[in-house]
């Protein structure tokens, strides 16, 4: 059981499509780096993914793929708890409770809701709207002071704090108010349009975690650098993005040399791109190898998730019991 005295942390990723390097550098890598300092709870957010149009035949496969990605990135089950959201019923229970505290107007203001409702016009389901209540439950069940996510989750975290505050005011101090914890890259931009974040909804701008070195090279060669014809003093968003990837992939030497060249005005973008492609392929190689090993051993993966669900439920049920007592919905 999770009996560690360390502060807790929790994060989740939806099983709805392939992971890209933005997910990796903005979130997954952070999960791994935090595991010595925090008691981590990491989940595959399969209940959240029900709000999207996904073929039911693919659901389980996608859930296992995300779970494998967590392990391939370096999550260690001795230190962290890895589980699937739907295996721990407390999430849904507390999620419902939170829908009774969140104002509809606040939910309607969420950009993710508006974006998704505009994208899947034939399926604007109520779950898309109440999504933040479930996400607040995911988080608050584990009482984490920090939540490692990319900055696209800022609004969700704000609503999580709002619901925690409302609960505390109405039923007495119960929840700590969690804060987002970002990496050096809280928002990696799209290679195709560096004014927008890299997102699986626009695959042409993504480097996927299963891309081969050849594909990575091709995509980075095509990445948008400068759109203005005259050189400007300010580094363009596309070039900045490439430098960020180089730095995050650990190639300090070339990062320093190419930054100096940029400052002198002698940088060739073709050279920058070559180094970024190399560094990315090198960074992903061990991940890709581990991923292959993990996904090929489904029985072991399922065991990790079954055990993780037990450990997560133990922590979550303790919080839920306390919540129910305070609300007057538990016989003692
Ligand atoms: P999702 O695939 O939308 O469930 O996202 C999983 C995690 O990756 C979340 O913590 C996101 O904030 C993070 N993330 C998604 N896109 C990016 C990006 N372009 N840059 C940095 N982090 C990201
Ligand atoms: N909303 C997150 C995303 O789209 C996924 C998520 C669900 C999550 N529950 C969470 C992230 C709890 C952090 C904490 O990326």
Image (cartoon, rainbow, N blue to C red):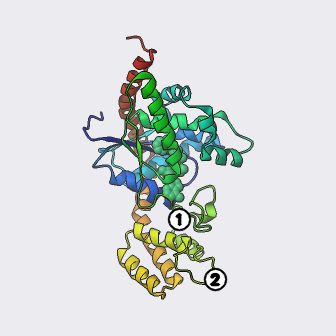
Neighbours of disc 2 within 10 Å: few (<14), some (14-19), many (20+): few
- Dividing the picture into quadrants, the one containing residue 96 is top right
Asked whether the beta carbons under mark 2 and mark 1 sit within 8 Å of each other, the answer is no
Residue 245 vertical position relative to residue 126 in the rendered view, above or below: below
Count the marks: how many?
A: 2
Q: Which of 98 and 173 lies nearest the eye of the viewer?
A: 173
Left or right position of 100 against 255: right
Which of the two labelled residues, at mark 2 and mark 1, occupies the earlier sequence position?
Answer: 1
Q: How far is mark 2 from mark 1, CA to CA? A: 31 Å
Left or right position of 272 against 286: right
Residue located beneath label 2 in the image = 229
Quarter the C terminus occupies: top left
Residue 277 vertical position relative to residue 105 in the rendered view, above or below: below
Please tell me whether mark 2 sits on a helix, a strand or a loop: loop
Q: Residue furthest top?
A: 331
Measured as percent of width and height from the top left, residue 90 is found at 46, 28
| Residue plotted at (44% across, 38% down) | 139
Q: Residue furthest left?
A: 5
Disc 1 within 8 angstroms of ligand 1 (CB): no
Q: Is residue 84 visible?
A: yes
Left or right position of 48 against 287: right
Residue 18 vertical position relative to residue 145 in the rendered view, above or below: below
| Residue plotted at (44% across, 53% down) | 27
Residue located beneath label 1 in the image = 211
Q: Is residue 44 visible?
A: no
Numbered tag placed on residue 113 in the rendering: none
Measured as percent of width and height from the top left, residue 289 is found at 42, 61
């Amino acid at each position: 059981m999770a009996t560690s005295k360390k502060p807790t942390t929790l994060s989740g990723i939806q099983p709805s499509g392939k992971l890209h390097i933005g997910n990796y550098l903005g979130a997954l890598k952070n999960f791994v780096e935090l595991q010595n300092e925090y008691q981590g709870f990491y989940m595959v957010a399969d209940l959240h993914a029900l709000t999207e149009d996904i073929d039911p035949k693919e659901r389980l496969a996608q859930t296992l793929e995300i779970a494998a990605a967590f392990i391939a990135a370096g999550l260690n089950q001795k230190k962290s708890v890895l589980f699937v959201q739907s295996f721990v019923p407390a999430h849904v229970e507390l999620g419902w409770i939170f829908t009774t505290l969140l104002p509809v107007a606040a939910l309607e203001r969420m950009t993710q809701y508006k974006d998704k409702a505009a994208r899947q016009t034939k399926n604007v389901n109520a779950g898309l709207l109440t999504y933040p209540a479930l996400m607040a439950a995911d988080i608050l069940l584990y009482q984490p002071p920090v939540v490692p996510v990319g900055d696209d989750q800022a609004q969700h975290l704000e609503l999580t704090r709002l619901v925690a505050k409302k609960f505390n005011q109405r039923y007495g101090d119960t929840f700590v108010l969690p804060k987002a914890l970002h990496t050096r890259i809280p928002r990696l931009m799209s290679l195709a349009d560096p004014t927008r974040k890299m997102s699986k909804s626009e695959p042409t701008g993504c480097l996927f975690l299963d891309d081969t070195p050849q594909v990575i090279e091709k995509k980075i060669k095509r990445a948008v650098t400068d759109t203005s014809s005259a050189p400007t003093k300010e580094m363009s968003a596309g070039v900045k993005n490439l430098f960020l990837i180089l730095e995050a992939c650990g190639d300090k030497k070339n990062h320093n040399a190419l930054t100096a060249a940029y400052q002198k005005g002698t940088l060739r973008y073709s050279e920058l791109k070559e180094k970024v492609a190399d560094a990315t392929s090198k960074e992903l190689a061990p991940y890709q190898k581990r991923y292959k090993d993990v996904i090929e051993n489904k029985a072991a993966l399922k065991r990790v998730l079954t055990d993780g669900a037990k450990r997560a439920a133990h922590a979550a049920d303790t919080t839920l019991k306390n919540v129910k007592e305070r609300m007057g919905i538990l016989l003692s």
